[in-house]
Image (tube, rainbow, N blue to C red):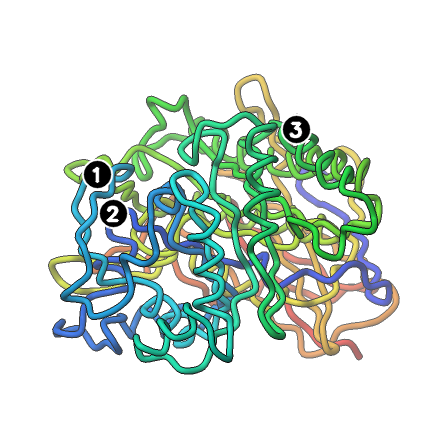
Amino acid sequence: MSENVVPAVINLDVPGPVINRHLYGHFAEHLGRCVYGGFYVGEDSEIPNEGGIRLDVVAALRALDIPNLRWPGGCFADEYHWTDGIGPRQGRPVMVNTHWGNVEENNHFGTHEFMLLCELLGAEPYISGNVGSGTVKEMSDWVEYLTRDGDSPMVRLRKANGRDEPWRVRFWGLGNEAWGCGGNMSAQQYAAEARRFGTYCRDHGDNKLYRIAAGANGADYAWTETLMRQYGELGCAYRPSSFMQALSFHFYTLSGPWRAKGSATAFDTDDYYRTLVQAARVDELITGHSNVMDCYDPGKSVGLVLDEWGTWYDVEPGTNPGFLYQQNTLRDALVAGVHFDVFHRHADRLIMANIAQTVNVLQAMILTDPESKALVLTPTYHVFEMNKGHQDAASLRVDLPAGLPERAAGDATLTTVSLSASRKDGQVLVSLSNLDAEQPADVELDLRGGTLTGVQARILTAGALQTHNTPDTPGAVAPRAHDGVTATAKGLRVRLPAHSFVTVAGRLA
């Protein structure tokens, strides 16, 4: 085949595993300006808000069909004591955020504020409990406070704080990064703690908990094996009330070594390719953890969760190094596109993923300017929006030939064309990325088992990899209609300019 023409076969009539909408999940930690100054501005703010929650941020995220929001951390979760964040705000104690900037927090954003935020977003809450410095009773009480009806000590406390009806909260994290900031535990130590905490996190009424055990750092497959062995040793009779329904891991994309991660905006082509090579490693890691899980759980009853992922660079010059504020360029959008293609291919085991983080931290969807009060949608935001049709759609297998176009990146090589596809309610969505910084590519889609009508395409690209959105140039990287799609005898030919992300949508005839 020609160097930059890629044939791809998609069987439109053979649906695969459903792409769980929670693969498009989000993450909000008490870190920098994610919560305070991002989601929450206070009821006295001149910025339009409801209960202190910033409404333009809510509107932007609702446009993504945001499925869930993870809170309060991250590392912060294992020093957060939830009872400090309930009751009248003026009476809540001040705490020190020792993980992120050593700043004082007034606890004005707590459980009730988070649940209001989730209601405004139309998103399911995912709460990470405190295993590192908390107690089993503390977490058990939090579950009861949120989800129990009737009469009990925690129900009476909730009602005293203004909420009569319980909330529905399915997703509960049993701590966070227990191998590091969540307690510096060994896998064996954490497995014992997870069993204990998970056992006492009870189902109340018809609220059935989905307990997510804190899993591995990157490729630590031994951690996953230890937890899965614990799961298996409980025996079939115990599984209906098992201590975990899912197991997480974390993976961040870096363009350089940890102490010199590089700039989010001032990078060259070599940095770009190194970053994309690292991003593509997520496929290897999901495969590795899935293979371990298959040994103990061949029926895939335990879900795999990647509840922290994204790019991590050096902070922007002049900002607090503990706030992890970084810009977001076209490079980050392409990192997101690659991740989603991988997620879709692993939809049989991977049930949730959470970008880190939603506002003003790391690979954010939204940046808010503290001076102008402006809101900026990042290039990564636009990939989430362009891809939202994949949520709860059936994945479609994409068959690609050997010898795909590649670029060298140090000692590694990067396959420069990536794509995935899905169908739902008669609608087909194909996502395609050309990661080549300089050369365009054409993809010949051989569509079997059906034809598409009403085909529409959109493209996200820019003149330079480093292009990003600011309050002065909010649309520098934004989607637009793409006229580079033509019909062929077998399907469609899609033109992909250099460094571009494209979606093609059509209805099954």
Residue situated in front as seen by the camera: 219 or 207? 207
Q: Amino acid at mark 2?
A: Gly
Q: Which structural element holds mark 1?
A: loop
Query: Which quadrant, please, contains the N terminus?
Result: top right
In this picture, residue 110 sits left or right of residue 207 = left
Disc on the earlier residue, 1 or 2:
2
Residue situated in front as seen by the camera: 146 or 476? 146
Residue 294 location in percent, x, y? 80, 40
Q: Which structural element holds mark 2?
A: loop
Residue 101's mark? 1
Location of mark 2 (residue): 32
Q: Check contact, mark 1 vs mark 2: CB within 8 A.
A: yes
Q: Check contact, mark 3 vs mark 2: CB within 8 A.
A: no
Q: Is residue 472 visible?
A: no
Residue situated in front as seen by the camera: 186 or 290? 186
Q: Crowding near pointer 3: few (<14 within 10 Å), some, many (20+)? A: some
Q: Amino acid at mark 3?
A: Tyr
Location of mark 3 (residue): 221
Residue 257 location in percent, x, y? 41, 21
Query: Which quadrant, please, contains the C terminus?
Result: bottom right
**Depicted 203 relative to depicted 367: above or below:** below
Q: Is residue 460 visible?
A: yes
Q: Which structural element holds mark 3?
A: helix
Whole-angstrom CA distance, mark 1 to mark 2, is 7 Å
Residue 341 location in percent, x, y? 64, 50
Locate residue 37: give its quadrant: bottom left
Disc on the earlier residue, 3 or 2:
2
Whole-angstrom CA distance, mark 1 to mark 3, is 32 Å
